[in-house]
Amino acid sequence: MNKDVRVCIIGAGPAGLSAGMYLEQKGYFNYTILEKNDHVGGKCHSPYYNGRRYEMGAIMGVPSYYAVHDVEEFCGITHDGPKLNRNYKDSKGNVIEPFEPRKNPLRIPHLMKMKKQVKKLGEILETKYRGYDINGHRGVAEGRYDGYAVTPGREKVSGVNENLKDLALPFKEFCEMNGVELTQEIWIGPYTSFGYGYFDEIPAAYVLKYLDFQTTMNFVNINLWTWQNGTQFIWESLNDKLKNHARLNSNITKVERKDGKVYVTVNGTVEEYDKLIVTAPLQFFPDYADAREDEKEFFSKIDYERYDVLAVETKPEDHPEISYYVFDNMTPERLGHLMVYYRRWRDTKDQVITTYALRKHRDSEEIPYETCKQTVLEDLRTMKNPASNVVNEQSWYYFPHIFSEDYAAGWYDKVEAMQGRYDTYYAGEVMSFGDMDETAEYSRELVDRFF
Ligand SMILES: Cc1cc2nc3c(=O)[nH]c(=O)nc-3n(C[C@H](O)[C@H](O)[C@H](O)COP(=O)(O)OP(=O)(O)OC[C@H]3O[C@@H](n4cnc5c(N)ncnc54)[C@H](O)[C@@H]3O)c2cc1C
């Protein structure tokens, strides 16, 4: 593509800002990033409290976050944040150690069986499901893989593997089919409690592309990255470094694509571009753009999670000594309950803790926001870490995804075939997975493939 092409990027979260970085690195400098908020970072949102930053959105990374590492290198920053740690409680607030055989002699046969199944899952992922962990979903529903390996060099790989079609199944079914159902007890911690839905409703592809075997082991061994100034700082640093900083408070009211040009109405003024990259939620693209029938049809299939975060103060004597996971609350039956709470700063009790809950499951009615909030506050009392005050709260539009039927019917290949069709490219969470690295990595590939 001509290096002078004028590219409009919608959204200054990880996907949009990294698209800018990768474009620059390929010699494209004529891009504009439009952001509706008054800050960059999207769901990487790290407000201040008592002079330090806490996390309302993204928290952590793993050593295989190669795209995030590209950003760190580009900006000269590193993952210098507080070490993560955790413990477990049951729904009554008792501290438990479910994976510690010495503490649970009666569970030893179960734990041994689970260990065997984890090993088996690791083996079948390498063999039967070869190619499962490629970023993005191209070809999976047709039994192919095509993309870049999750390695520092991100080698281009492609191949045929009919078994990959199984990844369209809900993860629970996928595990049962492969005789590894107990592995869900390990995978659920960094999956459901991190807001990505329940294993009986979410296609295995999402679970395993995010929690590939290596990444899951990093979670198990707490080999994780955080940032002193929050994940938002990564994207603020990138925005500062980019030649063209994101234009904040951009209210896009219209997008019109005609005669090989893209006209974007921003804060009342029409701007002309050659190409458009949409990283904002595709589901809402038809609300302001001249969406074509195919765009409307495919984007209407997208669903998302309602993931609620509270930042709360506690009295010093009620402050948790560590972060806690509550496995009992990670089932659809306990929708709307506290699944995890995070103590970020271990050296002081004058910081907030953050709580996490889901309130939607495909087969049940959505729990109203306020009901969920009150349930979570009640759960904190049960956990013996009551909140004295709520200082921040957010219900996120979270983890846009499609369900198994659409996945199996080739949603991704059809949307991938639309890339560039209307001088428009689609990136952001739904195209890969809702985490910082997969979205940034997808932008890298998009730039590599089309620019
Ligand atoms: C509570 C929580 C915890 C998380 N934990 C982690 C974690 O530990 N590790 C991890 O890797 N990820 C985590 N994530 C997920 C991660 O933050 C997201 O997957 C990532 O930010 C997605 O990047 P994105 O650019 O695709 O979308 P977003 O971050 O959502 O950014 C999209 C941007 O587009 C803007 N926008 C939307 N509509 C428009 C419009 N019409 N015009 C202009 N701009 C628009 C938005 O304001 C936003 O800035 C977490 C998220 C949350 C909410």
Image (cartoon, rainbow, N blue to C red):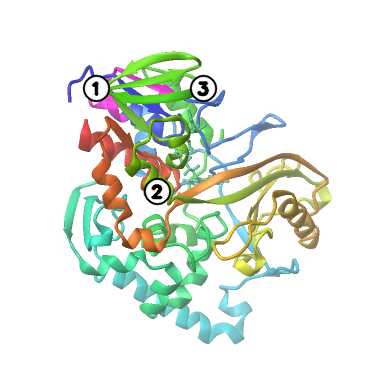
Local secondary structure at mark 3: loop
Q: Amino acid at mark 2?
A: Pro
Work out whether 96 lies above or below 295: below
Q: Quadrant of the N terminus?
A: top left
Q: Is residue 200 left or right of residue 432?
A: right
- Beta carbon of the mark 2 residue lies under 8 A of ligand 1: no
What label does residue 63 carry, if any?
2
Q: Quadrant of the C terminus?
A: top left
Local secondary structure at mark 1: loop
Rendered residue at 44%/50% (across/down): 302
Circle 2 packing at 10 Å, graded few (<14), some (14-19), many (20+), is few
What label does residue 251 carry, if any?
3
Rendered residue at 32%/69% (across/down): 166
Closer to viewer: mark 3 or mark 2: 3
Does residue 52 appear anywhere in the picture?
yes
Most foreground residue, 66 or 140: 140
Circle 1 packing at 10 Å, graded few (<14), some (14-19), many (20+), is few
- Beta carbon of the mark 3 residue lies under 8 A of ligand 1: yes
How far is the residue under mark 3 from the one under mark 2?
36 Å
What label does residue 377 carry, if any?
none
Most foreground residue, 238 or 32: 32
The residue stretch that appears in magenta:
22-34
How far is the residue under mark 1 from the one under mark 2?
45 Å
Q: Is residue 319 left or right of residue 355?
A: right
